[in-house]
Amino acid sequence: MFEKILVANRGEIAVRIIRACKELNIRTVAVYSEADANSMHVQLADEAICIGKAPANESYLRIDRLISAAEITDVDAIHPGYGFLSENAHFADVCESCNIRFIGPSSRAMNLLEDKAVSRALAKKAGVPTPPGSEGVIDNEQEALTTAKRIGYPVMIKAIAGGGGRGMRVAHNDVSLVKGYHTSRSEAEKAFGNSGVYIEKFIENPHHIEFQILGDGKGHIVHLGERDCSIQRRNQKVIEETPSPLIDNKFKKLREKMGKAAIRIAETAHYTNAGTVEFIVDDKGDFYFLEVNKRIQVEHPITEEVTGIDLVRAQIMIAMGEPLRFKQSDIEFKGHAIECRINAEDPFDDFRPSPGRIEMYYQPGGRGVRVDTHAYAGYTIPPSYDSMIGKLITYGKDRREAMDRMSRALGEYMITGVKTTISFQQAILQDPNFRRGVYSTGFVEQLLSGARRELIEPNP
Amino acid sequence: MDLKDIKAIIDLMKKNSVSEFELEKQDFKIKLKRGGNGGGAVYEEGPGVAYLPAQAPAALLQPAPVPTLVPSNEIEIKSPMIGTFYRAPSPESGSYVEIGSEVTSESVVCIIEAMKVMNEIKAEVKGVITQVLVDNAKPVEFGQPLFKVRPA
């Protein structure tokens, strides 16, 4: 049994992890940069250690300082959250060698899924379809051209070390391919320290559907259903929901097929703890494996609402060596859940980040409403990190109820002092195509360009 | 020190959001502590110190830990890392520095041990140690004040 856990993260996910620990009677240690001294996770934890200046590479990414903090507070385990060091196999190794349990997959599983090219090969081994593409990293311009010719345009050039929607570029012909190949390589080198790129068939307006998995390291791997994350802006998720309206309305058999594929991938990778298997689905109902996210994800709450399973608690229990207490057949999916990410950005100014002091803060409530946030009145959002200040999740007995509840809840927010994307979310919830459940990853761009047209021609 | 002076100090503390103030002179010591909304303060002569506890502090939304009011000519040596603070190179040795020790920027003032590695911490300032702020073998965090130095 863990007595104390160090939370190696910040913001809303640190609050989430601390809550799960408290409910398990496990003491918590928060770490914080100087910019986060007033952050909610610092207030809620039992102990708090300052680990450096604001920039992440001087604080939350400093393995030496995290381990030192873990040592002086004598913790049993570290929960890495998402982002930062959560998918860093070296960090997982350092924790284990210091006798600190890393709450996440083993470094072995992480290495088997270490980058997108390696994962593609593993998916092939597991018999799971992948988008037509290169076998591995593209070594030169000529190989890029022959690969693109074999697959057929349009193609996507992707950084193998990319993540969070970054490091991807589309090419429609030889000229843009060659240009894109070289630009992508230098961008990837700068952003991820790894210039490796590979090429995949570009599926136009795909649907992004991912499956939550849990493995206990004792031979049991289950999936907890899908999340449809196609509502994205510039490859950043904006709204997520479960079940997927595409699957429910058009391709009901996909749930079982994709769920089984997700488990096969996890088994082939000897995966333990929580993870998410990402797929792309086209309009014909063909699905292709993309990658595995080897961490708890931002949108995990919608799975929790529909299955009744506390995913962060499951992570902690698995890390403590507990076997899963349920089989695949025990998992029930009830109702519908939607999540809206609330960012401190100005949707009327190209989503420019809006850090600063929150003056007034009132968040929605009532039946079927859940808010996961670290924000509060008087909190100053630091400019050094991402702009997400909270997640609004609504649950309903069906999609209609969850949507109506979401519209109702979005309207209850009162936040002054910073700009937020709440009005943007409201626009999406009122869009007729979204309400019908008919959308793909091109949805937001279409919505925004339509809105822009209206601004230019107010009276058509 | 009379009531007027104490009121002035309390006002200054309020104005600058300082939560603690301590002053020690030959026969006299005063410690003022603010908390929540309108905590109390007590003045007492002699070696003892007493203060009215603040009203139950709001568990959340405490102001950020601000540096205590430091006479403007003193510099704090802050910890550059996280670990355990040691005054001396080994349990048998004497401390690196005491109050009154002269230091240069290259003087080692303490050890901070992290992951079994003993890191010598340099003063990085020239002057005289006026205060030792952490007890031996206690854990310290990044940015935590370790010593006060009156610069030369």
Image: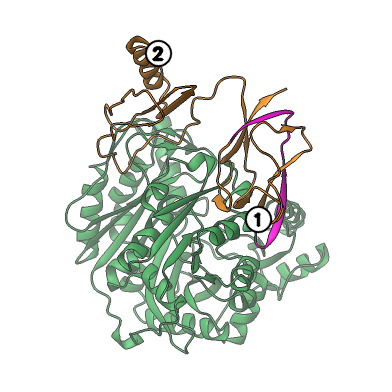
Left or right: A423, with B125 as reference point: left
Residue A167 visible to the viewer: no
Residue found at x 24% / y 61%? A395
Q: Colour of chain A?
A: green
Residue matched to label 2: B1
Color encoding of the figure: by chain
Q: Which chain is orange?
A: B
Check the image and report above or below for A457 versus A311. above
Q: Chain of mark 2?
A: B
In this rendering, which labeled residue sits more in front, label 2 or label 1? 2
Q: Secondary structure at mark 2?
A: loop
What is the quadrant of residue A128 in the picture? bottom right
Quarter of the rendering occupied by the N terminus of chain B: top left
Left or right: A328, with A284 as reference point: left
| Front-most of residues B47 and A312 | B47
Check the image and report above or below for B36 versus B45. below
- Give the image location of residue A118, x and y in percent: 66, 75
Residue found at x 76% / y 67%? A138
Check the image and report above or below for B98 versus A209. above
| Magenta stretch prevailing secondary structure | strand
Quarter of the rendering occupied by the C terminus of chain B: top right
